[in-house]
Image: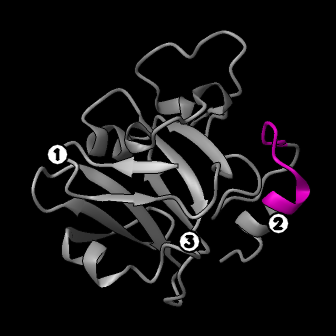
Amino acid sequence: MEVNCQCKTVHFRTPTPSPLAIYHCHCTECRKQSSSAYGTSAVFPADGLFPLSDDLAAKLSVWTRPTERGNTMDCYFCKVCGSRVMHRIRNPDGTERETVSIKGGLVEGLQWQRAVHIYTRSAVVDIPEGAERWEEAPDNMPGQKKKGCQWSELSEQQLSHLYGQRA
C-alpha cells in the first residue's frame, strides 16, 4: 500500500500488502494529535520499514513523548508539511515494539470498514451502530490484558505476529 503525506514529500510503501489492524482511537492524546474527534491508525509490522532508510529519515522529524502506560512514543512528522505520518512505541526497557502505527488518512486503499473504535469512554462523537468498540484498548493490544476480545478478520498468526512480545 502506498503512503503519502499531504505534500507528498514523504512517500513509501507499507511493509505488508494490508494492515494487521485498523483502529479509530478516541483517547485525548489521539484527538489532540489528529486535531479531530479521533485518530485513525493502520498497524503494520515494523520489519521492512524500520530501521528507516536514510532517504526517508531525512524527510521526517521525530517528537518523543511518554505514554500514560509508562512507555515512550516516537512520533514521526513530515518536515515540509507537518503531517503526522506514524508512531512507534518503545517499552519501558527501551525495546521497540514489533509494530508501527501509520496514520490512516495517508494510506492509499485502506479498507476503513475493518476499523475498531477504541477508548470510546473518551469519545466526543457517536460511534456507528454495529461498530466494534472498546471503552479502553482491546485484549492483545500492546499494554493491555483483557479477556474476550476478538479483532475483526485477524488470524491467530497475525495476532501473534502483531502482539507476540508484550511489555
**In x, y percent, where is residue 1?**
53, 49
* Picture residue at 32% right of the left edge, 64% below the top: 75
Q: Quadrant of residue 129?
A: top right
**In x, y percent, where is residue 29?**
35, 47
Q: Amino acid at mark 1?
A: Cys
Q: Amino acid at mark 2?
A: Ser
Q: Nearer the viewer, residue 149 or 153?
A: 153
Give whichever of discs 3 and 1 has the lower sequence position: 1
Instruction: Identify residue for label 2.
Output: 160
Reply above or below: 157 against 82: below
Marking on residue 46? 3
Quadrant, the C terminus? bottom right
The residue segment tinted magenta is 149-158
Instruction: Identify residue for label 1.
Output: 7
Q: Is residue 112 left or right of residue 154?
A: left
Circle 1 residues within 10 Å: few <14, some 14–19, many ≥20 = few
Q: Between marks 3 and 1, how big is the CA–CA gap? A: 24 Å
Give whichever of discs 2 and 3 has the lower sequence position: 3
State the residue lying farthest toward the left. Answer: 80
Circle 2 residues within 10 Å: few <14, some 14–19, many ≥20 = few
* Picture residue at 45% right of the left edge, 49% below the top: 2
